[in-house]
């Protein structure tokens, strides 16, 4: 009897081991990275053919959080419990709220991150198509930065398949666009991190130069000091090269750094905690000619991101992770972090008004 029990136990153990090994092999062999310098094809919608010097333009950056992050939502990778959005209806509501908020700022350019399509976590809703429909008079560029195999964790609600990216909208025609791959972790954590990248969209200027729009979503999970430094150095070098050619550079996005360098402390107060991924923005790496837009209109610092280990409220840690960089030939007229109460995303938009110098 004992031998029979041991034999059955061994068979069960071997079956479980085979399942685990098969799943690991599935992850390994289905994993791939998108090549660097991938050409992106802009989807037409804009009618204006060029931007002008001396004209004030508005840009909005917004991490959409794949339509999941209502104020009550907590995310398993932040220490919360949920993996999927609450429902299809909730995702659609978040899309509508985000589009309405962004439109209220009358933007010329929109830089969005975490926009899903055909993903388990967002009920396979094509968020990309919905935002394109919400902004019909804009060109759009989309760069995929998340294309995972089926992730079986957390076991109570597997994250499943994920397809997501960064989206750039422009009410002036985008002449060309490129996807630049960023260095990411080479350890097992690469299977849960995004295929990090930034997109580069080129818009003609009346003086023969180009407005070069950068849309970035830098590493958080699975990152390291070396990877963060590599990613920022690549972006800064790219922007500096364009600036030295006489082009105008505007970069917006989710930098996954403490963008002001002290927002975790300023906004944290008694809640101050250590977040290894929210390292101070590497101001010392910024080359001459490129600067952060942190001279905010509002003297009181407004958070652009919340940690999602608990629902949004008094016990929730907040940060400034999102913002803009510009080259010195771009004059910043104003910059605002918008308080949305994190009603439709774990991030809030940042609005930049700027003009290109003659």
Image (tube, rainbow, N blue to C red):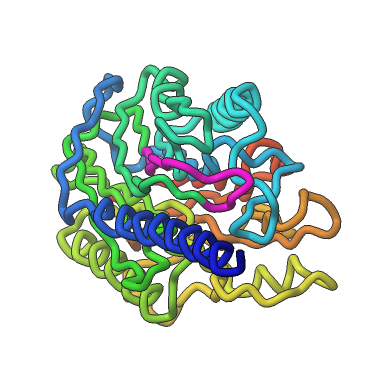
Q: Position of residue 216 (x, y in %)?
A: 38, 54
Residue drawn at x 40%, y 31% is 118
Q: Nearer the viewer, residue 300 or 187?
A: 187
Q: Position of residue 163 (x, y in %)?
A: 38, 40
Q: Quadrant of the N terminus?
A: bottom right
**Residue that lies at the very extreme toward the front in this rendered image:** 1
Magenta-colored stretch includes residue 165: yes
Q: Position of residue 59 (x, y in %)?
A: 45, 41
Q: Nearer the viewer, residue 104 or 299?
A: 104
Residue 330 seen in the current view: no
Residue drawn at x 52%, y 59% is 8
Q: Position of residue 316 (x, y in %)?
A: 77, 58
Magenta-colored stretch includes residue 241: no
In the visual, does 54 lie left or right of 192? left
Q: Nearer the viewer, residue 110 or 154?
A: 154
Residue 107 seen in the current view: yes
Q: Where 40 sits versus 277, above or below?
A: above
Query: Dividing the picture into quarters, in which one does residue 351 lie?
Result: top right
Residue stretch in magenta: 153-167
Q: Where 260 sits versus 322, above or below?
A: below
In the visual, does 33 lie left or right of 222? left
Query: Dividing the picture into quarters, in which one does residue 194 lie?
Result: bottom left
Residue drawn at x 81%, y 71% is 269
In the visual, does 260 lie left or right of 314? left
């Amino acid at each position: 009897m004992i031998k029979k029990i041991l034999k059955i136990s061994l068979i069960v153990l071997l079956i479980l081991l085979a399942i685990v090994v098969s799943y690991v092999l599935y992850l390994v062999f289905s994993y791939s990275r998108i090549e660097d310098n991938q050409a992106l094809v802009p989807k037409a919608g804009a009618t204006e053919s060029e931007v002008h010097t001396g004209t004030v333009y508005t840009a909005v950056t917004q991490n959409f959080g794949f339509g999941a992050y209502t104020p009550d939502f907590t995310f398993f990778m932040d220490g919360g419990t949920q993996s999927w959005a609450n429902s299809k209806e909730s995702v659609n509501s978040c899309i509508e709220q985000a589009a309405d908020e962004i439109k209220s700022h009358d933007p010329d350019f929109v830089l969005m991150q975490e926009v899903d399509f055909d993903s388990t976590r967002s009920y396979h809703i094509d968020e990309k198509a919905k935002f394109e429909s919400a902004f019909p008079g804009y060109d759009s560029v989309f760069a995929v930065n998340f294309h995972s195999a089926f992730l079986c964790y957390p076991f109570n609600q597997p994250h499943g398949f994920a397809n997501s990216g960064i989206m750039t909208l422009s009410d002036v025609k985008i002449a060309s666009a490129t996807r630049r791959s960023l260095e990411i972790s080479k350890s097992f954590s690469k299977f849960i991190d995004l295929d990090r990248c930034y997109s580069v969209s080129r818009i003609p200027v009346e003086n023969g130069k180009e407005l070069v729009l950068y849309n970035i979503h830098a590493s958080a999970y699975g990152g390291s000091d070396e990877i963060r430094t590599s990613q920022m150095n690549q972006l800064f070098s790219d922007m500096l090269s364009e600036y030295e050619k006489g082009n105008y550079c505007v970069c917006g996005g989710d930098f996954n750094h403490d963008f002001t360098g002290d927002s975790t402390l300023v906004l944290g107060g008694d809640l101050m905690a250590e977040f290894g991924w929210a390292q101070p923005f590497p101001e010392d790496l910024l080359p001459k000619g490129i600067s952060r837009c942190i001279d905010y209109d509002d003297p009181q610092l407004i958070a652009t991101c919340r940690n999602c280990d608990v629902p949004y409220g008094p016990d929730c840690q907040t940060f400034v992770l999102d913002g803009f960089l510009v080259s010195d030939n771009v004059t910043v007229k104003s910059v605002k972090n918008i308080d949305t109460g994190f009603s439709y995303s774990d991030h809030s938009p940042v609005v930049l008004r700027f003009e290109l110098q003659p």
